[in-house]
Image (cartoon, rainbow, N blue to C red):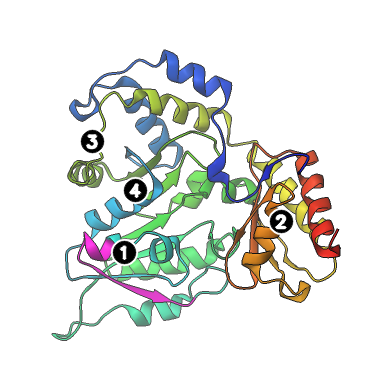
Amino acid sequence: MYDRRVDLRSDTVTKPTPEMRRAMYEAEVGDDVYREDPTVNRLEEVGAARLGKEAGLFVTSGTQGNLIAILTHTQPGQEVILEQESHIYYYEVAGSALIGGVQLRPLQGKDGALDPAEVEASIRPDNIHYPDTGLIVLENTHNRAGGTIIPGENIEAIARIAARHNLPLHLDGARIFNAAIALGKPVVELARPFTSVMFCLSKGLGAPVGSLLVGPRDWIEKARKWRKRLGGGMRQAGILAAAGLVALEKMVDRLAEDHENARRLAEGLGNLPGLSVVPPQTNMVLVDVSATGFSAPTFVARLAQYGVLAVDMSPSKVRFVTHKDVDREDIEYALRAVEKLIKGD
């Protein structure tokens, strides 16, 4: 039996703080579909201002926010350019095709970043045989690349291409605050090149539920109607939005602690035999375990017997994610557990 449980599967497993729970209990609420919930209204205003956009929309999840963005930006029969390992393409159950009637055009990136020249070459010319390109999407930080940060010059180059072709540019910024903290830059600077941005409150920021979609005011009004169509029109949602406000106001700066713990975890894993570790940029550590003789799924299953939870990202790679509910003692315990697993103890 293991001594403790250390959950490094994802930062989605975070629990709300006591301050969030109090705020939820005391939240002033109303009917948000009627635009009468003052706490939701404040969250949308604060979130939009934080990213330098005109307006915001509180949505149930990052997946819903990305889908609403695609539905609002595009028309059925159009094509969306994105990276082939992106969350929208990999994990969002083909919602864009099923509900939006759009075709996704995945391009191979490097550490999550697309080649601007390839993006421009992939924009469809006017031809009766082709779908029209309707949208370009980037992801920052990039989940499957290991929490990598897309370089600013890469984003700027793609933004110029989008503007040249009169195309909107959407950011899946589920963990954009991780990128901002790691770079030491204001989040508004990272959001500036994009027409719209989705970011999550329920990952590293620790809120129990919800994401925000931000962009131009008239565009957000159209997005609000899509949210309603998708069944996302919540009523006294201020109970949830109250936790989101605490997340934005109190939980951003502490992300640096998660990044520090990820670096310590990566350093320790890198000193163990059979492990090849990708140096983390934010709060994710990718590890190739193939030289241990274990497949990634077997490695994860065996590690769980020691009370340490991770996820397999491929047949050979395991991902560990640090977050607010994992402290330095947990990291050291996880390192000892991995060492025991490798040694067969």
Q: Residue at label 2?
A: 303
Q: Residue, x 64% and y 37% (percent of image)? A: 324
Evaluate if marks 3 and 4 touch, with contact meaning CB atoms under 8 Å apart: no
Q: Mark 1 is on which residue type? A: Ala
Q: Residue at label 3?
A: 233
Vertically, is 258 above or below 140? Answer: above
Q: Mark 1 or mark 3: which is in front?
A: 1
Vertically, is 258 above or below 28? Answer: below
Query: Does residue 193 belong to the magenta stretch?
Result: no
Q: CA distance from mark 3 to mark 4?
A: 13 Å
Looking at the rendered structure, the secondary structure element under dot 1 is: loop
Q: Nearer the viewer, residue 271 or 279?
A: 271
Which sits earlier in the primary sequence, circle 2 or circle 4?
4
Residue 135 lies left or right of residue 286; in this view the side is left
Vertically, is 155 above or below 34? Answer: below
Which sits earlier in the primary sequence, circle 1 or circle 2?
1
Q: CA distance from mark 1 to mark 4?
A: 14 Å
Q: Residue at label 4?
A: 65
Residue 25 lies left or right of residue 228; in this view the side is right
Q: Mark 1 or mark 4: which is in front?
A: 1
Local crowd at mark 1 within 10 Å, few (<14), some, or many (≥20)? some
Q: Mark 3 or mark 2: which is in front?
A: 2
Please state, as top left, top right, bottom left or bottom right, where the N terminus lies in the image: top right
Q: Residue, x 66% and y 60% (percent of image)? A: 300
Looking at the rendered structure, the secondary structure element under dot 4 is: helix
Residue 208 lies left or right of residue 301; in this view the side is left
Vertically, is 193 above or below 257? Answer: below
Which sits earlier in the primary sequence, circle 3 or circle 2?
3
Q: CA distance from mark 3 to mark 2?
A: 41 Å
Q: Which residues are magenta?
A: 96-108
Q: Mark 2 is on which residue type? A: Leu
